[in-house]
Image (cartoon, grey):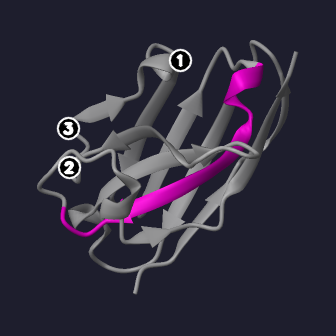
Amino acid sequence: QVQLVESGGGLVQGGGSLRLSCAASGRTFSTYRMAWFRQAPGKERQFVITISSSGGSTISRDSVKGRFTISRDNAKNTVYLQMNDLKPEDTAVYYCAAALDSRYSTTNPTDYNYWGQGTQVTVSS
């Protein structure tokens, strides 16, 4: 069983920055593909960004390219989401997710086995 705990959410003005963290339990964190998803009120859960198990490759949705960066520290069992130039449309609950099968660069939430409880990010205009 893998437990994921997000932190770092909050209220920020448009143009500001936030850094989310996701701490994972377990001794095999370095084998998981990790990702961040988000869900705004009344909308479906949406892929944001993912990183390979080694940290060598990332994929992000077009709307966050150049603004959001994902990274991981396998020694600390932690994945990070650095969000810059935040916009009101980035407002959502952000979820950390882990995929045990790290062979594929998937953006489909059904391919992720474990989820955190979510952290709220609110961007004011």
| Residue 17 visible from this viewpoint | no
SS assignment at label 2: loop
Q: Give, as a three-letter code, the residue at label 2.
A: Ser
Q: Residues within 10 Å of mark 3 (few under 14, many from 20)?
A: few
Say which of 13 and 71 sits in front. Answer: 13
Marks 2 and 1, how far apart at CA: 22 Å
Say which of 109 and 119 sits in front. Answer: 109
SS assignment at label 1: loop
Q: State the residue position of label 3.
A: 56
From which residue to which does the magenta span run?
88-101
Is the C terminus in the top left, top right, bottom left or bottom right quadrant? top right
Which numbered disc, 3 or 1, marks the residue that appears first in the sequence?
Answer: 3
Q: Which numbered marker is on residue 54?
A: 2
Q: Is residue 69 left or right of residue 33?
A: right
User: Pointer 2 and pointer 3: residues touching (CB < 8 Å)?
Assistant: yes
Locate residue 116: give its quadrant. bottom right
Q: Is residue 53 left or right of residue 83?
A: left
Residue at (74% x, 34% y) in the render: 91
Q: Residues within 10 Å of mark 2 (few under 14, many from 20)?
A: some
